[in-house]
């Protein structure tokens, strides 16, 4: 018997929030190892872990991804500007001479560069801290520890091995499916309430039909039996 990974994961609950609505696999990949091949080349090893995530949590993770992509170039620009300014500050500090005619303008420029450098450092630090603090950050709920995947569902106090979480989730999924099957069978095959059968009454003398709550036969006038 062949097993489909996507179908198996879709039968489990969402790892993050525990929902069973619209669950599908989520490819969580992270660099777990790096190897220096040459002075300019480094080989990175990525670990892929497929985790059951519901549609809502998947949309949340996309919010984090969009935020990261949107601010990536801003972070890169801020980092480059910080390095350039730092180099300029060092050069200006070395060439500064208080007794020179250009001493005062030189000092003012040096102070301005230091202020700009602090602004850029604060900017890139704010971007990184916001990304780490976002509840939509997947790394708050899944990560690799010693090259082994670990997960932390919402409300869980500690990280647990993904293999252990899968065992527990599979057992819960089996019990959930059994309960649903039992409730379905109970609804389909439960005995219905007996229907009350009413039979037509006829006059004992002339045989004509007697209507409900009728005390006398309309044909012969005989009293009906109640």
Image (tube, rainbow, N blue to C red):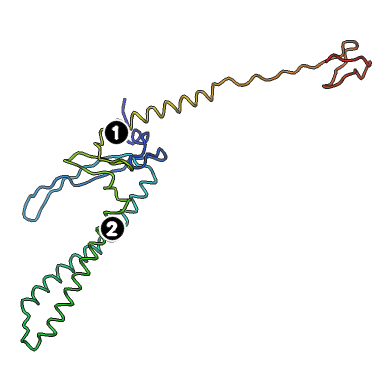
Disc 2 is placed on an element classified as helix
Residue 166 placement (x, y as % from top left)? 29, 33
Q: Is residue 135 toward the left or the right of residue 186 in the image?
A: left
Residue 188 placement (x, y as % from top left)? 54, 24
Q: At x 28% / y 47%, what residue is drawn?
A: 140
Give the distance between the C-alpha atoms of the residues marked 2 and 1, in whole angstroms.
31 Å
Circle 2 sits on which residue?
Answer: 130
- Furthest-front residue in this view: 157
Question: In front: 204, or 31?
Answer: 204
Residue 163 placement (x, y as % from top left)? 25, 33
Q: In which quarter of the image is the C terminus?
A: top right
Q: At x 87% / y 10%, what residue is drawn?
A: 204
Q: At x 8% / y 76%, what residue is drawn?
A: 93
Give the number of marks: 2
- Furthest-top residue in this view: 205
Q: Mark 2 or mark 1: name the one nearer the start of the chain.
A: 2
- Furthest-bottom residue in this view: 101
Circle 1 sits on which residue?
Answer: 166
Question: In front: 107, or 2?
Answer: 107
Quadrant position of residue 101: bottom left
Q: Is residue 180 toward the left or the right of residue 61 in the image?
A: right
Disc 1 is placed on an element classified as helix
């Amino acid at each position: 018997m062949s097993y489909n990974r996507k179908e198996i994961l879709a039968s489990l609950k969402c790892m993050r929030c525990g929902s069973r609505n619209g669950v599908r696999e989520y490819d969580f990949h992270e660099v777990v190892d790096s190897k220096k091949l040459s002075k300019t080349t480094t080989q990175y090893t990525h670990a892929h872990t497929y985790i059951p995530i519901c549609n809502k949590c998947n949309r949340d993770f996309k919010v984090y991804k969009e935020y990261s992509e949107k601010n990536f170039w801003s972070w890169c620009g801020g980092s480059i500007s910080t390095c350039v300014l730092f180099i300029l500050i060092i050069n200006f500090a070395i060439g500064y001479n208080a007794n020179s005619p250009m001493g005062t303008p030189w000092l003012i420029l040096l102070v301005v560069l230091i202020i700009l450098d602090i602004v850029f450092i604060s900017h890139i630090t704010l971007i990184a801290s916001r990304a780490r603090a976002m509840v939509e950050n997947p790394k708050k709920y899944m990560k690799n520890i010693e090259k082994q995947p670990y997960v932390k569902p919402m409300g869980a106090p500690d990280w647990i091995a993904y293999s252990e979480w899968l065992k527990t989730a599979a057992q819960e999924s089996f019990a959930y499916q059994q309960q649903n099957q039992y409730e379905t069978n109970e609804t389909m095959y439960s005995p219905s309430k007996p229907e009350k059968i009413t039979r037509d009454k006829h006059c004992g003398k002339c045989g004509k039909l007697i209507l409900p709550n009728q005390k006398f036969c309309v044909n012969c006038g005989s009293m009906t039996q109640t």
